[in-house]
Amino acid sequence: MNRILVLSVAMLLASQAAPAAAPATSISVVGQLSGGNKVSASCTVGKTDLITGAGSLSGTNTSNGYKYSYPFNITKGSTTSGKLVLTGKFAPAYGGYPVTLTASVPSGSVSFAYVVNGKTYTLNGTGTVTVK
């Protein structure tokens, strides 16, 4: 009788165990940067953990009111010290320059850096990361 009771308790405990977290399939980043710029990116996480996606840097030129949106592609993603690091390039029509988007998870500091002719430009701000 004790065996049946122990087995029943073990089965009950096993059935109440918290389910394993599902692997992430998508990541989105939204940030408000210096100078009124905004950055956003949406990525998918593949079965081999490859992170790819697209995003844009947008804003308004304060000197002439011109509204811009520069698209970029994400080709790689990684994490380090509580931050998500996405790398890629601006679309070819916008020079194909390298870009790096770094964001604290789940929210906090965000930086967007791009390199043009060997010079790095960095825009800092705050934002959020959503993982689903």
Image (cartoon, rainbow, N blue to C red):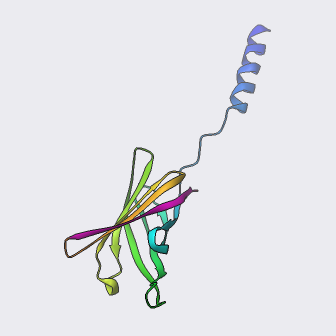
Above or below, 93 against 21 in this view is below
Comparing 10 with 123, the one in front is: 123
Comparing 101 with 23, the one in front is: 101
Is 125 on the left-hand or right-hand side of 20? left
Q: Residue 128: image x %, image y %?
A: 55, 58
Where, quadrant-wise, is the C terminus in this rendering?
Answer: bottom right
Q: Residue 74: image x %, image y %?
A: 39, 68
The image quarter in which residue 70 lies? bottom left
| Name of the residue lying farthest toward the front | 63
Magenta region: 119-131
Tell me if I can see residue 23 in this picture: yes
The image quarter in which residue 91 lies? bottom left
Q: Residue 34: image x %, image y %?
A: 45, 68
Above or below, 77 against 18 in this view is below
Q: Residue 23: image x %, image y %?
A: 53, 50
Main secondary-structure element of the magenta-colored stretch: strand
Q: How many marks?
A: 0
Please report the residue visible at 47 percent of the width from the left and 78 percent of the height from the top: 58
Q: Is 126 included in the stretch rendered in magenta?
A: yes
Where, quadrant-wise, is the N terminus in this rendering?
Answer: top right
Please report the residue visible at 35 percent of the width from the left and 77 percent of the height from the top: 90
Is 101 on the left-hand or right-hand side of 41? left
Above or below, 76 against 8 in this view is below
Above or below, 99 against 66 in this view is above
| Name of the residue lying farthest toward the left | 118
Tell me if I can see residue 49 in this picture: no
Please report the residue visible at 60 percent of the width from the left and 40 percent of the height from the top: 20
Q: Is 115 included in the stretch rendered in magenta?
A: no
